[in-house]
Image (cartoon, rainbow, N blue to C red):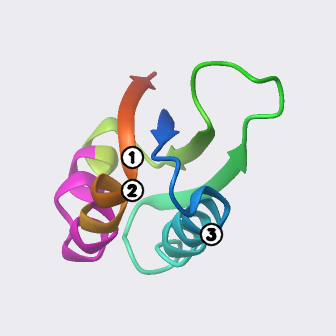
Amino acid sequence: MTTHIVFWKLKPKNMDENATEIARRIGALVGVVPGLLDATVARNTNGGEYDLALISHHESMQALHDYDKHPAHEEVRKFVRSVVDGRAAVDF
C-alpha cells in the first residue's frame, strides 16, 4: 500500500467553498479510479502554512502513478490548480 499526502494553500477568494468542493471532487474519485482505496480531505485547524490536506491510500506505487494520469483525476486537478496558491506532497 502507498500513502499519498498533499497540502494546499488556498487562494483567499471563496476559500471555504473551494475547500468543500475539493473534498467533494476528490472523494468522488473513490470507486472510479482503480487502485484508489480511500481519500480524506480536511481543513487545517492549527493555523499553519497550508489550509487543506489530502490523505489517500493506493494499492501500490503503480496505482498512485495510474491515479495521477487518470482522466477523472485530471479534471479534479484542473479545478484544484485554479483555486490554490501552493502545494506540497509526500508519498510513502
Circles 2 and 1 in contact, beta carbons < 8 Å = yes
Q: Is residue 20 magenta?
A: no
Query: Whole-percent x and y of residue 35?
Result: 41, 60
- Under circle 1, the secondary element is strand
Q: Closer to the camera, 53 or 5?
A: 53
Q: Mark 1 points at which residue?
A: 84
Q: Is residue 3 above or below residue 47?
A: below
Residues 32 and 49: in front is 49
* Residue that mark 3 sits on: 17
Question: Whole-Å distance between the Cαs marked 2 and 1?
Answer: 4 Å
User: In the image, residue 75 lies at what x, y percent?
Assistant: 25, 74
Query: Which residue is the extreme one toward the front?
Result: 13
x and y percent of residue 48 in the render? 68, 19
Q: How many neighbours does mark 2 have within 10 angstroms: few (below 14), some (14-19), or many (20 or more)?
A: some
Mark 2 residue type:
Val
The quadrant in which residue 78 appears is: bottom left
Q: Which amino acid does label 3 sit on?
A: Glu
Classify mark 2: helix, strand or loop: helix
Under mark 1, the amino acid is Val
* Residue occupying image coordinates x 19% and y 74%: 71
Residue range in magenta is: 65-77
Q: Distance between the residues labelled 2 and 3?
A: 10 Å
Q: Which of 73 and 30 is in front in this view?
A: 73
Give the residue at mark 2.
Answer: 83
Tell me the crowding category of disc 3: few under 14, some 14 to 19, or many 20 or more residues within 10 angstroms, Cα based: few
